[in-house]
Image (cartoon, rainbow, N blue to C red):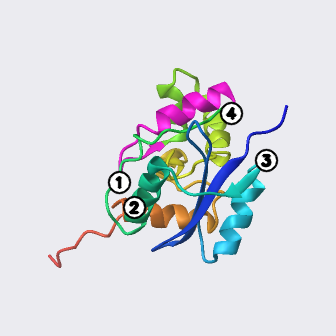
Amino acid sequence: MAQAVHNYLIFETDAGFCGIAWNAVGITRFQLPTKKAEDTERLLLRRLVAGEPGTPTPQIAEAVDAVRRYFGGEEVDFTGLTLDLEGQDPFFREIYAAARQLAWGQTTTYGALAKALGAGPEAARDVGQAMAKNPVALIIPCHRVLAAGGKVGGFSAPGGSTSKIRMLELEGVHLGPPEPAQQSLF
């Protein structure tokens, strides 16, 4: 059986060039920004079996606009976008559905997300693997899922954990040690 062709678009945001791929069902892939359009296209195509540039559907145009607004610092909700996660591991799809419920500026941990799904603490590793393999990063907000103790954890996107921190900072989330309290001299 021939693999369905995905259309894709590379577009510029305030953070760099992003890529989005879709089929007749919905969005199938999303590439977080890189500095060069060619790099974004190469990374996006690496994850597509068959892809060719295409004219965005109204929903894809809406998604592109939302991503541009997001990287411009505007609060954006991606939950209304239709995804096609066919071929993803069934438990990963459950994890992705739970992660999609994390709102702007809201974070959780791998362990807490596993627990919310009714799985034991050992499933935290599965949550981490699902986030690392997230085909539509940002739209499924894996950057909002942290390691134990609120630590950054890994991030497989270009720029690694620095990109994750920047995305969280866009949302008003600041990780790291708290600012020292002002101390009185007395």
The residue at the point 74 percent across, 65 percent down is 42
Magenta-colored span? 89-108
- The disc, 2 or 1, on the residue closer to the chain's N-terminal end is 2
Looking at the rendered image, the quarter that the N terminus falls into is top right
- The disc, 2 or 3, on the residue closer to the chain's N-terminal end is 3
- 6 with respect to 138 (left or right): right
Q: CA distance from mark 2 to mark 1?
A: 6 Å
Q: Residue at label 3?
A: 49
In this view, 171 is above or below 17: above
Name the spot of residue 163 as percent of width and height, x first. Answer: 54, 66
- Kind of residue at disc 4: Gln
Q: Are marks 2 and 1 in contact (CB under 8 Å)?
A: yes
Element class at badge 2 = helix
Q: Residue at label 2?
A: 70
Q: Nearer the viewer, mark 2 or mark 3?
A: 3
Q: Are marks 4 and 2 in contact (CB under 8 Å)?
A: no
In this view, 179 is above or below 90: below
Is residue 148 found inside the magenta-colored segment of the image?
Answer: no
Q: Residue at label 1?
A: 76
- Kind of residue at disc 1: Val
Name the spot of residue 85 as percent of width and height, x first. Answer: 62, 35
Q: CA distance from mark 4 to mark 1?
A: 25 Å
Q: CA distance from mark 3 to mark 1?
A: 30 Å
Q: Residues within 10 Å of mark 4 (few under 14, many from 20)?
A: some
Name the spot of residue 87 as percent of width and height, x first. Answer: 71, 32
- The disc, 3 or 4, on the residue closer to the chain's N-terminal end is 3
Element class at badge 4 = loop
Element class at badge 3 = loop
The residue at the point 83 percent across, 36 percent down is 2
Q: Nearer the viewer, mark 3 or mark 1?
A: 3
